[in-house]
Amino acid sequence: MHRFLLTPRWWGINVFAVLSVPFCLFMGTWQLGRFEDRVDTHREATSGRPGAETATPLDSLLPVDKKTSGRLATASGEYAEQFLVPERGLDGKSGFYVLTLLRTDGGRTLPVVRGWLPGAADAGRAPAPPAGRVEVTGALQAPENSGTKGVHASGGLPAGQLGVIGAASLVNLVPYELYDAWVTVQTGADGLTPVPAAAPSDTGLDLKAFQNLGYTGEWFVFSAFVLFMWFRLYRREVEAIRDAEAGLAEPGPSAGSAEAGTTESGTVTAGTAEAGTEAESTDAGTAAAAPAGAAATATRPE
């Protein structure tokens, strides 16, 4: 009964199913792994910053990536120019950051966000930085860009204000060599509120993470659909064979009728041909007899 599984048609169906199911399962598992990686990265980015870990020298944490972003970094030097970063929210309130440049012992300059104040940006309200040599410890952050959430990228700010925190924004404002990073001090001082470290980009449970989860379900559904269609085709084939063996299959065009018609037609034609042959023989005999009779009449003496 199951010999149909060895036919070329079913060979193609079987090979397709055998290859498709493992592929769909592999892709679903891979997408699920991507989602779990994003969950783990998000958990690390939100739970481990900044904690009780030991502060590390700044240069050993550069360049900033997903692993080093938010880590406590230390740098020593002297404070220089100070800028205000307007339109920054904290705890549901609008305010501004107080950003001071630290000229480190290594020669490069590090932007340091010393804290946050509520209200409109006002240089008169921002406390002056400490004088002399200082050692700064803060959460390391990647440079901002025009696409970073909350930045003021439209320009048009007054002197002494900065819309985007990063070397690209400061390079035309100060004559120093800049670090392509910045730190936010986690200990409040001079009446400033510490600015929490932001999670690194592409580590949150955003739309991409849930897309991975949705793709996981789709691949597993495709795998189940392939198995369902194979079983359905198999069952229909078996039922058709059983109906044929039980004589329940609907008869197709009668081959016997066609053969009978052909036989009868051939018989009639053959009979007609034989009758014609006999008629031709009789006519030929009559024609042959006529000259003979005529000849006999002509030679008979009167």
Image: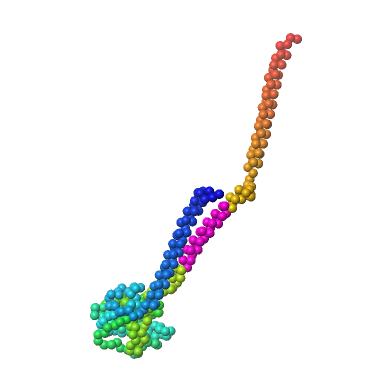
Magenta stretch in the rendered image: 214-238
Q: Is residue 278 magenta?
A: no
The dominant secondary structure in magenta is: helix
User: Would you say 74 lies left or right of 260 here?
Assistant: left
- Any part of residue 6 in sight: yes
- Image spot of residue 153 (x, y percent): 38, 78
Q: Is residue 229 magenta?
A: yes
- Image spot of residue 116 (x, y percent): 36, 85
Residue drawn at 55 percent across, 57 percent down = 232
For the residue pair 62 and 295, the one nearer the viewer reads as 62
- Image spot of residue 13 (x, y percent): 50, 53
User: Would you say 234 lies left or right of 154 here?
Assistant: right
For the residue pair 107 and 223, the one nearer the viewer reads as 223
Q: Quadrant of residue 84?
A: bottom left
Q: Is residue 211 above or below residue 273?
A: below
Residue drawn at 49 percent across, 53 percent down = 14
- Image spot of residue 161 (x, y percent): 34, 83
Give the quadrant of the C terminus. Answer: top right
